[in-house]
Amino acid sequence: MMAMVAVQLDPGSIDVLQRIAIAQVVMAVCIVVISLIAIGGAIVVLLELRSARRLLHNLGDTVAELKPRLAPLVDRTIHITSDVAGMTDNVRRRIDDVLFTMEEINRVVKRGGSIAEERIERFAEVLEVVQTEAEDLLLDAAATARGVHETARQLRDEPPRGQPRRKPFDTPIDDDELEEMFE
């Protein structure tokens, strides 16, 4: 057999053992409190889960009741959506046609503008040539008229006695005289 040995403890050891025992009791109480909180939380979660299950069941019943009423609404919504898509495509096509027409008009106007500009430039050149020719013609006509007038004057006027008859165009006409005649 074993012999029992009695251990005698000193008062310092007893204080340490009492502190350890108190710490273990406090820890045990904390564990019990935490366990009770966890159990309470689990009960609350189970109650909420049960409530959520009832809510889902009621929602399922409501959907089942609304399903016959919603089917025509869904069909009508699908029909309206397809109509709107068709209208949108139609509007898009018409806008594309308008844009194409505007681009064509823009090209024609630009081409017409450049052609008109070329014609105006050619017309200005023709007018310049016509003006030059008209000026030359008028100068020739003026010179001819001057010659005719001078000849007529000399033929009409008698020279003084003893002087020979003057020939026409003995005196040249300068440009200033010619311009004065036509002003």
Image (spheres, grey):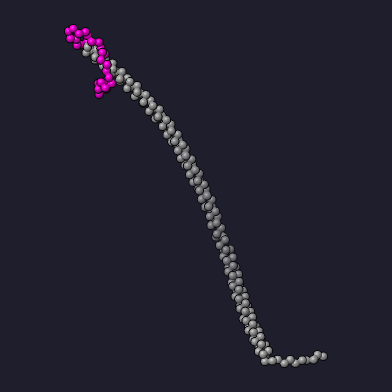
**Residue ranking furthest to the front:** 162
Q: Position of residue 65 (x, y in %)?
A: 57, 63
Residue plotted at (60% across, 76% down): 41
Residue 111 picture location, percent across and down: 45, 34
Q: Per the image, is 121 magenta?
A: no
Camera sees residue 56: yes
**Outermost residue, top direction?**
162
The residue that appears at 75% across and 92% down in the rendered structure is: 6
Work out whether residue 162 or residue 108 is closer to the camera in this orientation and state it. 162
- Residue 178 painted magenta: yes
Q: Kindly give the residue lying farthest to the right in the view shown.
A: 1
Please state which of residues 177 and 96 is positioned toward the viewer in this rendering. 177
Q: Quadrant of residue 27?
A: bottom right
Image: 77 above or below 152: below
Residue 107 is situated, as x and y percent measured from the top left of the image, at 46, 36
Please give the range of residues in magenta. Answer: 155-183
Q: Is residue 180 above or below residue 74?
A: above
Which residue is at the far left?
Answer: 161
Considering the image in quadrants, where does the N terminus appear?
bottom right
x, y percentage for residue 29?
63, 83
